[in-house]
Image: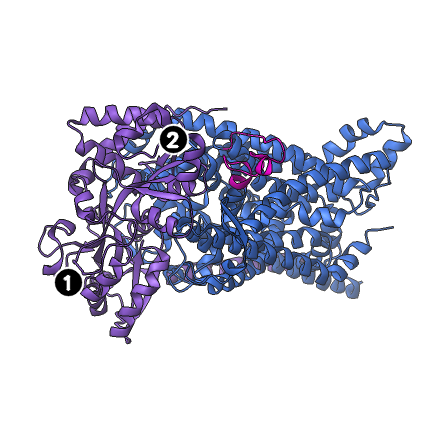
Chain colours: A blue, B purple
Amino acid sequence: MALTSSRQRTGSRDRAFFIDTESWIMRGLLGLGIVWLVVGVVLPLFPMVTRSFQDTAGTWVRQANYVRYLTTPALAQSLTNSLWVAIATTLLSVGLGFIYAYALTRTAMPGKKFFRTLGLLSLYIPPLANAIGLIYLFGNQGLITNGISGILPGININLYGPNGIILGEFLYCFPQALIILITALNLTDARLYEAAEVLGASPIKTFFTVTLPSVKYGLISALFVCFILAFTDFGVPKVVGGNYNVLATDIYKQVIGQQNLSMGATISVFLLVPSVLAFVIDRIVQRRQTALVSAKSVPLQPKPKPVLDWVMFGFCLLVVLFAFTVFATIILASLVKVWPYDFSLSFQNYSFRGVGGGGYAAYWNSIRMSLYTALFGTGIVFIGAYLIEKGRGLKGVRSLSYFLSTIPLALPGLVLGLAYVFFFNTRIWWIPFTGIAIYNPFHGLYGTMAILVMVNIVHFYTVCFLTATTALKQIDAEFEAVSASMSVPFYKTFWRVTVPLSLPAILEIGIYYFVNAMVTVSALIFLYPAKLPLASVAIVNMDDAGDIAAAAAMSTLIVLTSLGVRLLYSFLTQGVRKRSEAWLSR
Amino acid sequence: MVSTRFKTIQSAFSRHRWRRFISLLSLSCLVTLFVAACAVSQEDLQQAEGGATSDDTSITVYTALEDDQIGDYLTSFEAQHPDIEVNIVRDSTGIITAKLLAEADNPQADVVWGTAASSLLVAEDRGLLEPYAPKGLEAVNPRFRDSANPPTWVGIDVWMSAFCVNTVESEKLGLPIPKSWADLANPAYKGHIVMSNPASSGTGFLSVSTILQNSASEEEGWAYLDALHENVAQYMHSGSRPCRAAGQGEYPIGISFGYRAVKQKAEGEPIEAVFPEEGSGWDVEANALVKKPVIKEAAKTFLDWAISVDASEKYAQNFAITAVKTDVPPPEGFPANAEAQLAENDLKWAATNRDRILEEWTKRYDAKSEPKS
């Protein structure tokens, strides 16, 4: 009797000790996550918001900037324009993205691997190059506008204006929506479809009662992401927007055109509003989300349905063809001498001699930066999403982390870059209202590779975070419950169950970070130091200097690199992915 | 039996609390330590604000000069001062100026080289520039430098507005080549002209401000702009883009600046550079010393070199007008007497009235730009 009770006691004591340590590790990690988000997202916004209450000389003017902007007659117009463009882009991108993702995951369409890689093609193209491609295709002298020198009937789509913006934003948003939707559609339980079939439900009914509800969360995320991206992007409207004003170009005009950083900050605050709204809606909707893949789930093996499969094949081909035409135009632009007057071809634009921007040094810097971004970004995002989604305790902290993780999406790159300059390039901070000054412990980061990597991780944080969350949500909480009851610490479950199950999503995030870091400009243009020229910035500089062919050449290099990395990546990880998915199949 | 169990529970409980206490204690110690380490004492504050480390062998130069010119210019500097490393940050005027302003608390640049004087006036207004009289200042044309002594900014060359006219497209459309600003108001050009948006581009503002200054009255200037607006297809967000659009035949006429027109023509585009009869708007590409706690000698050395005859002769290969007169003939495509081409332009007046002009411009033309779908 005495013996047993003492053994029981030791057992329970060990377990108490264990759970205790574990929960402290969990709390510690959550704490670290919060510190990361606060330093990377919240604190840099402070100087930005403060500036919106100051005039250009730094004097406190309270709400004067807001009043001035609100009373500008152009504002209402810009706001309506922004909303219209964003809504149209969202519907188009998510609608087509959904069909495309559906074809990839739920049909037995041929050439899935091909479509999966090329569906993201326009993501690999620097936005400015996309704009060049669009102008050369649909502009007043465009190949399509003139029907390839009059061989075919020309089609004029009135590129400069809302049409151009929507088309450009579509190229930009479609792959983003696709990533989220593929992840959402990927994980499903085949038993639901078997049940539907047995019960005699028609395919249409199955679609509305099984498929749609199961991807509701991903669908909403995709809508929310596309809307905000299209609402805040200034790259596309700047080049093909013509006289169609949107809020994002208003910021550009203030900051770059008139050097009025205070007004730029004020308009940036306006841009934050829809994201906060979107966040609230998102939270309300997803509260009801439940796991879709339980421990007993069976992966769906789509059965061939010739008609559907070939219709889908045709649809995907059209989408890919469009993105590819734009890319082919860029390649052509990199080879011709004087577009559209002298079509003699040469490779001399690939030497980057006599043009600025840093040439191949910039190209290698960009690759280095993108690799670091992919490596660290994926780790941080996935662990962050895991702690929020699957962590225990500290509910408030987790909700806050979730909220902070969604904010970066609402920050246009230009705003983020400026905010980083304000925040990190200050040696001494004055804590408001106290008169206490402290050294900025992060000042050392300014002007280094580290801050470039950091701003990239933050800039693209939300889409990666939502992808990770979508994947994690679809994994049954039972795994955690069982592990806990068996005294397996969460980090072991994380490493042995969660990571392998989410591997496709994790790989997707890594690639997403890589390709975005390769092409992004807006946040980096204020931050890159003299000694680290970057390829994407070089494109802007070359285009600005009129060396369009060289800009197109650099863009082509970037696209080919991203495609190459993607293929290499899926080749190298093939074994790992097969193994991680194998235990899911019957 | 009962008492042992109670004791165990009690000890487990207190161990739990003990652990929590230790953790909180160490955490708060860390935070205190961190804040204390970061806090700045009063004496330190002054020192720290003036305590940038000075390394006199390398300087950072911000410039808006064209990329392809920079390398050529710098070979001259490197030959004379092989011991000084020059790190160039090149970007458009708008970005360079925004960068300067954003970094105001802790300037990164030592020198600004070849950036629009009208933008440097904005930086001067915020107290970001240190007046400095570079060696050889007396050779600089007084029209192209700050009138104060020592000057805050000193020009190196002048760029002026010009029309980029695509000859192929003009012929196709049967449009005559415009010769003057007045010609551009001709209804025949409706929808065929693009110009830079003055709200987002210095070049655009240059054109608007020159028109206002050179009209009989400001009202007349606005009346002309009203007429011009009827013909403008697009206001573009960059100074060079209208010329680019003209070069690609997107629109036959782009109101841009001379250097671009001449350069694009040299590269084989069917472009004719037109310098308007009434005179061109102009601005100076100028240098300035950035105000910093420690100003490097090398920065001054650079500024001295940047207005030297040697450097000016190199500028003259690209620009018709240099601040220091040289014997180099103006590049092909520019008018022979380029200085006579310059319209009346008071840069200070333009800087002071900029907000007012842009507000009026935006009200008249920008808010009206309805979607054309």
Q: Residue A75 appears in which quarter of the rendering?
A: top left
Residue in the foreground of this view, choosing between A490 and A45:
A45
Q: Residues within 10 Å of mark 2 (few under 14, many from 20)?
A: some
Write down the residue under mark 2: B175
Question: How far across and down, in percent of the image, does residue B306 sit?
Answer: 22, 63
* Contact (Cβ within 8 Å) of mark 2 with mark 1: no
Question: How far across and down, in percent of the image, does residue A584 sit?
Answer: 81, 51
Q: Residue at x 65, y 44 (%)?
A: A179
Q: Which one is in front in this view, the residue at disc 2 or the one at disc 1?
A: 2
Viewer can see residue A423 = yes
Q: Disc 2 is attached to a residue of which chain?
A: B
| Outermost bottom residue | B83
Amino acid type, mark 1: Pro
Q: Disc 1 is attached to a residue of which chain?
A: B
Q: Is residue B320 left or right of residue A109?
A: left
Find out whether residue A140 is within the magenta segment: yes
* Magenta stretch bounds: A134-159
Badge 2 or badge 1: first in the primary sequence: 1
Find out whether residue A294 is within the magenta segment: no
Q: Residue at x 58, y 40 (%)?
A: A171
Write down the residue under mark 1: B134
User: Of helix, strand and loop, which mostly describes the magenta segment?
Assistant: loop
Secondary-structure class at tag 1: loop
Structural distance between the alpha carbons of marks 2 and 1:
49 Å
Does residue B289 sit above or below A155 in this rendering?
below
Q: Residue A133 appears in which quarter of the rendering?
A: top right
Amino acid type, mark 2: Leu
Viewer can see residue B363 = no
Residue in the foreground of this view, choosing between B32 and B246:
B246
Image quarter in which the N terminus of chain A is found:
bottom right
Does residue A465 sit above or below A439 in this rendering?
above
